[in-house]
Image: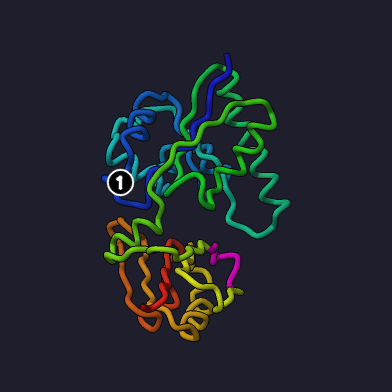
Amino acid sequence: MQGITYGVGVGPGDPELMTIKAVRLIRESKVIAFPARAAGESTAFPARAAEESTAFRIAAKVVPEIRNKTLLPIFMPMVRDRLKMAEEHQKGAKILEEYLEKGQNIIFLTLGDPTVYCSFSYLQHILEEDGYEVRLVSGVTSFCAAAARVNMSLTEWDEPLHVIPASHRTEISQELSGTYVLMKSGSRMKEIKEFLKAGKREVFCVENCGMENEKVYYGAESIPEDAGYFSTVIAKEKE
């Protein structure tokens, strides 16, 4: 029988936000996959690649025995070249399929929730097209955790919520009512700040939410232009 791949969300950074289900699946599985920053080096030194993975480090704080499992670093390039991405995703899927063919289940660790702008979805599509079963395990999203961090409600009554991948898209209409969530904002923070300053919303930014180097900013002006990649901006309409 073929194995099953589980895309498991480990939450935004605070290990206490990992779900009981995520912890159980990690403990039960012998094979742990995770996004890697480099290709060849990650494969040659999986333990080193694991310690460079944010999702892995979060999981290891709750399940320290994860380091004794079979580790599969999967190179997920952070580039805009769709052909290059597709090529690497195919390579990564083939690595997973070797273990699935042996009947081994795989846990693929993801930050936040695997259904929200998650790179694992690219692998999921390939695996499913190749006839393998994939199951997603929900985790706490970064924007929900960020809103809780600043003690605010994202939506009330009939307010809409707009979740936008700011690293790819900064052309946003000021006319949309409701709350804006700008995810992974760090790479385009200068443009985002200009957009926010032109609007009439209350702005918060949480960088590295739940992690040891977490920082919270109140107001668009206070956000540094060199804020990290894992910066979540919330812009809420003023009452």
The reply to whether the magenta stretch includes residue 16 is no
Q: Is residue 168 magenta?
A: yes
Residue nearest the observer in this picture, 82 or 20: 20
Residue 128 falls in image quadrant: top right
Which stretch did the figure color magenta? 164-170
Circle 1 is placed at which residue position? 17
Q: Can residue 223 be spotted in the picture? A: no
Residue 83 in the figure: left or right of residue 179: right
Please give the name of the residue rendered at 28% of the width and 66% of the height, measured from the top-left corner: 150
Q: Position of residue 196 (x, y in %)?
A: 47, 80
Q: Where does the N terminus fall, quadrant-wise?
A: top right
Q: Amino acid at mark 1?
A: Leu
Q: Residue 137, percent across and down?
A: 44, 36
Quick one: 76 or 15, which is closer to the camera?
15
Secondary structure at numbered mark 1: helix
Q: Residue 237: where, in percent of width, then height?
A: 42, 75
- Number of callouts: 1
**On the picture, is 127 further left or further right than 23?**
right
